[in-house]
Amino acid sequence: MIVVIGFIIAFALMFFFGNRATRACRWREYRASDTESTWTCVQCGAKTTGLPRKSPEMCLRDNA
């Protein structure tokens, strides 16, 4: 019973503290070099460049 309550609390915390700006975004990385990557959102089609292994933290849906 205590495990079930722990799961409910964990999901509630994830819901309230999750990053809502990128909740719908699913970023895919395409590495051009060791210092720069192109990121594409498969959900909305937005594209941007950035650092390797560091996905964008904001939804760029309006810029697509």
Image (cartoon, helix red, strand yellow):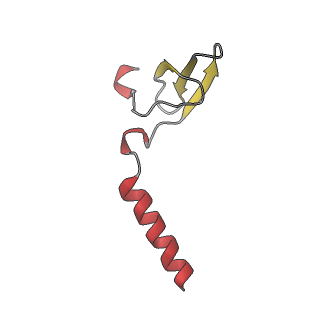
For image coordinates 36% across by 20% down, the residue present is 63
Which quadrant, please, contains the C terminus?
Answer: top left
In the rendered view, tell whether residue 5 sits above or below residue 23: below
Front one among 44 and 59: 59
Count the numbered circles shown: 0
Q: Is residue 31 left or right of residue 42?
A: right
In the rendered view, tell whether residue 25 sits above or below residue 5: above
Question: What is the x, y in percent for residue 52?
Answer: 59, 24
Residue closest to the far bottom: 1
Front one among 24 and 14: 14
For image coordinates 47% across by 66% down, the residue present is 10
Question: What is the x, y in percent for residue 43?
Answer: 50, 33
For image coordinates 52% across by 71% down, the residue present is 7
Which quadrant, please, contains the N terminus?
Answer: bottom right
In the rendered view, tell whether residue 13 sits above or below residue 25: below
Question: What is the x, y in percent for residue 16?
Answer: 36, 57
Where is residue 17, by image quadrant?
Answer: bottom left
Where is residue 31, by image quadrant?
Answer: top right
In the rendered view, tell whether residue 50 sits above or below residue 22: above
Residue closest to the far front: 35
Question: What is the x, y in percent for residue 49?
Answer: 50, 18
